[in-house]
Amino acid sequence: MNQKSERFLSLDVFRGLTICFMIIVNTPGSGATAFAPLEHAAWFGFTPTDLVFPSFLFAVGNAMSFTMKKFDSLSTGTVLYRILKRGLLIFLIGYLMYWFPFVDHTSAGWVFRPISGTRIMGVLQRIGLCYIFASLIIYFVKNKTAVVVISALLLVGYQFLLLVFGDHEAPYAMLTNAGTYLDKYLLGDSHLYHGEGVAFDPEGILSTLPAIVNVIVGYYAGKFIQEKGKGYETIGRLALMGCVFIFIALTWNMSFPIGKKLWTSPFTLLTTGIDMVMISALIYVVEVRAWNKYNWTSFFTTVGKNPLAIYILSEILVIAFWMINIGNKNFYAWINDVFYQKIAPGAIGSLLFAISYMLVCWSVGKILDKNKIYIRV
């Protein structure tokens, strides 16, 4: 059998692993501080949690390397329609997810949540936009070298825009960077994320530019794996390129600090570099050595087959937990206080809840997989 035409289990495992870890870091138990590696860096810096979202984008690029082959037999108009339809649907789903449950409970009862206070940008919105622009670049710019140049311009240009249009005293600060200025001007404070205590969106408009490169690198990594197959050359070259990206990122960090919330250009290079090293390790473990005793890979591929559906479920379900009141607490806080924090106080209890919640979402994925239900956009 020609190994280059086979399904790559390692890529499926990578996607499922990313979703599982994303759910764990997104839903820590309440009433305790999570372990430091399971929290995002405050501003500059890097933690394992900061790797999750860019890895999701990298996985989107991997999937594109398979699906975009179908575009060769389609007209340009059809290709544009499919790209825009999928990207905008993902964007719309993300927007509606942040608006959910569309009502607020007040002293006067349930009232409709006004659209004027909804967040416009977000995780799925960024995925949708990055998918659209990365797909258009790759489809229309056939020359790989030209795509590399465009990617470099996105990374360098992003820093240039921050330096020129941000506050010259603090161009990389949360409230004085050009991205925040642009978001406030185009979207307004009420449509931005307020989780930092101020109007600032970590998935803003301008910081989407370097994130597009995460998808492009994921695409070419997936394409390279398909072309070269599951051998040591693939592993070695992927790992080497990943290390080169990491080296450039750490060097660039001296003038443009690594930071997820600003999605700096060195952050894109660091995360794509780590992703390539991880993919090469998975190819070695899963494809070359076939270390799959007890079929452990199926745990991750179960989630990886329905990544979008499981992620949306994890977000919607936790909102439902917050809406259910038990006494003077919502269900999310109640189950942590009366159970998880009782059996394991502190960060361990928080982690146990996060793992339990991930397993609940995984169980839904298992049911979908067992019934051959795969939800696509």
Image (cartoon, grey):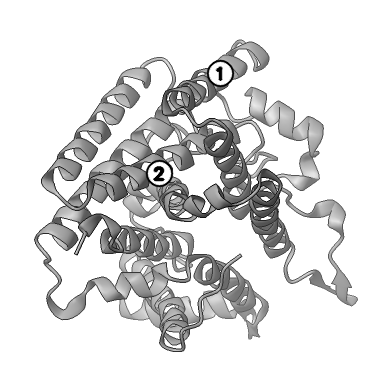
Q: Does residue 258 appear anywhere in the picture?
A: no
Question: Looking at the image, is 73 positioned above or below residue 244?
Answer: below
Q: Residue at x 80, y 34 (%)?
A: 186
The vertical placement of 252 against 83, above or below, is above
What is the total number of numbered labels drawn onto the structure image?
A: 2
Residue drawn at x 37%, y 22% is: 253
Location of residue 12 (image quadrant): bottom left
Q: Identify residue for label 1.
A: 157
Q: Residues within 10 Å of mark 2 (few under 14, many from 20)?
A: many
Residue placed under numbered mark 2 in the picture: 218
Q: Residue 7 carries which label?
A: none
Badge 2 marks a residue whose secondary structure is helix
Q: Can residue 165 be seen in this view?
A: yes
**Circle 2 or circle 1, nearest the eye:** 2
Whole-percent x, y for residue 368 in the image = 47, 83
Which of 121/146 is in front? 146
